[in-house]
Image (cartoon, rainbow, N blue to C red):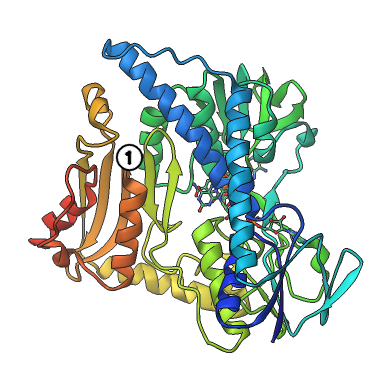
Amino acid sequence: MKVVIIGGGPAGRASALELSRLNQEVTLIEKTHMGGTCLNEGCMMVCGLVDVARFLNDAKRFNEMGIIDIKSDFTYKKVANGVKETLNKLRHVSEKEILEANVKLIYGEGIPYEGLVKVNKQEIKYDKLIIATGARSFYPPINGAKNAINYSDILDLEEVPKRLIIVGSGVIAAEFAGVFSSMGSEVHILCRNQFLNVLDPEISKFVANNLLEKVNIHRNVNVKEINKDGVVTHDGKINGKVLMATGMIPNSEFVGDIVKKGSRGEILVNNKMETSNPHIYAAGDVVGGVGSTPIARMEGVVAARNVIGISTQSDYRYIPHSISLDYDVAFLGPENVLSDSRENSKKNKLQKNENNKKENEKEKNENKEKKNIVTGKIPGTAGPGSFWKVLSSQTGFTHMEVDLDSGSLEKLYSITPSARHNMTYISMLSKLGHKTYDFDNFIESHPSTDSIYKLMRFFSKY
Ligand SMILES: Cc1cc2nc3c(=O)[nH]c(=O)nc-3n(C[C@H](O)[C@H](O)[C@H](O)COP(=O)(O)OP(=O)(O)OC[C@H]3O[C@@H](n4cnc5c(N)ncnc54)[C@H](O)[C@@H]3O)c2cc1C
Ligand SMILES: NC(=O)c1ccc[n+]([C@@H]2O[C@H](COP(=O)([O-])OP(=O)(O)OC[C@H]3O[C@@H](n4cnc5c(N)ncnc54)[C@H](OP(=O)(O)O)[C@@H]3O)[C@@H](O)[C@H]2O)c1
């Protein structure tokens, strides 16, 4: 079967590798660089900058304690160039992996039609098409919004902005606030409502007070205008470099009407990543919902399998998420619960109507009331990456909610240096059906900063 994939990000790459493994004839079309947003201007870039920010914070801590005298002067341009060099190397590795899998790779902008894709003046016929074109920064209709930079401009900054004003208060706002406040910027986050809405209020409060304590977080701000040198809000003007962090919008305009789309342009799919067109599948950020590389990869694989008739569904239960600050802030699921995280997102519009959704919500709430839920919270432990922070009481914590009757995890947050790794394994174990009582004989590697297993063991005795 001839399969064409548009987009070489996590979703498209995962589809291509899976289809090649299944011996199909695959063509992958990528407009710019292999690896998509994740590698070139998202996760990996943030990873590089967070490493530097954490080093600067540690250096400051050691200097203040008088333990090690570290001179930590740095030039932003050098940091940015170092990150760019690493990204370039990673791109080559990704490209090599694709080529070695015998995927035909074409660089150019793919425009899909029924039965064919146009790219670089060629027409490539397909039996099945997978659209994995991702999303880009969303600019709300604020006067002068285009004066603001976004995440893709970060590595082109000449220097650390003296004052950075971030419009939006989601994950991107939090991570860049952490990076630039550690590098010496005076950072202001302008939230239209609450800060970090994706977290429970007490967790977001902890993050604001303990991990972003140098950042000025302004709540309930109405941004009226954005200029080259600052923003005008209902409260007056603040001067500084403005970074837009107000979410993403799917890259789907060029798809036309060959598939059905939602109100924000997201391609509508069901859990098999099937669109309204029987020959076309879509995966990753272009279908809307939470932007996450592991979700995009999973959907890419699911689309690939369904393309050749292996019936598979995306499973959104227990998805681990993490925010990279001085510690990792990790949690399960965008709603922090075990249920199908996309149940409430735009994803299932093809399958469910509004009435069904309301019924499901009602059922979920009723089930919750019937459960015997207990909460546990413990501070983080001393260990690798946290040892010297204990002296200033910066220990982080783990918060867990458990249904005592079934032993199931209902909610889990962990804020420690190892939280993202621990969360990944808890996610898998939970998917496999493991309960708190399975942790009775859990043996950890020591020393570690994993507090999750401690709470699991505690609840296993109930
Ligand atoms: C700053 C930032 C930090 C992030 N950090 C994390 C993180 O720590 N962890 C995490 O899980 N997620 C993170 N994300 C989200 C993650 O990057 C995305 O969810 C993920 O990249 C989505 O993968 P995708 O394949 O759907 O789309 P993308 O990665 O966006 O890839 C889409 C690809 O399609 C190409 N394309 C678009 N249109 C066409 C066309 N017409 N023809 C050919 N090619 C086309 C694009 O050039 C791009 O390469 C972050 C995002 C940002 C912006
Ligand atoms: N570590 C990670 O996994 C990671 C890191 C970075 C990015 N990402 C992903 O990348 C995507 C983009 O991140 P993001 O932080 O931009 O999006 P986000 O987490 O969806 O947050 C968007 C923010 O913009 C605000 N907003 C939206 N429209 C606005 C408007 N008109 N005026 C003012 N504020 C507005 C929202 O406010 P409300 O809260 O009031 O709605 C919210 O605070 C997300 O899907 C995220 O999951 C993931």
The answer to whether 361 appears left or right of 393 in the picture is right
Question: What is the three-letter code of the residue carrying label 1?
Answer: Pro
Does 309 sit above or below residue 439? Answer: below
Which residue extends farthest right?
121
- Residue at 46% x, 65% y is 341
The answer to whether 357 appears left or right of 27 in the picture is left
Position of the C terminus by quadrant: bottom left
- Residue at 22% x, 36% y is 383
Q: Position of residue 452 (x, y in %)?
A: 23, 51
Q: Position of residue 266 (x, y in %)?
A: 69, 64
Which residue extends farthest left?
461
* Residue hosting label 1: 417
What is the quadrant of residue 129 in the picture? bottom right
Q: Nearer the viewer, residue 205 or 353?
A: 205
Position of the N terminus by quadrant: bottom right
Q: Is residue 194 visible?
A: no
- Residue at 65% x, 51% y is 248
Q: Is residue 64 visible?
A: yes
Number of callouts: 1
Q: Nearer the viewer, residue 354 or 87?
A: 87
Q: Position of residue 4 (x, y in %)?
A: 73, 75
Does 89 sit above or below residue 327? Answer: below
The answer to whether 164 appears left or right of 391 in the picture is right
Q: Kindly state the secondary structure of the residue where label 1 is placed.
A: loop
- Residue at 77% x, 81% y is 126
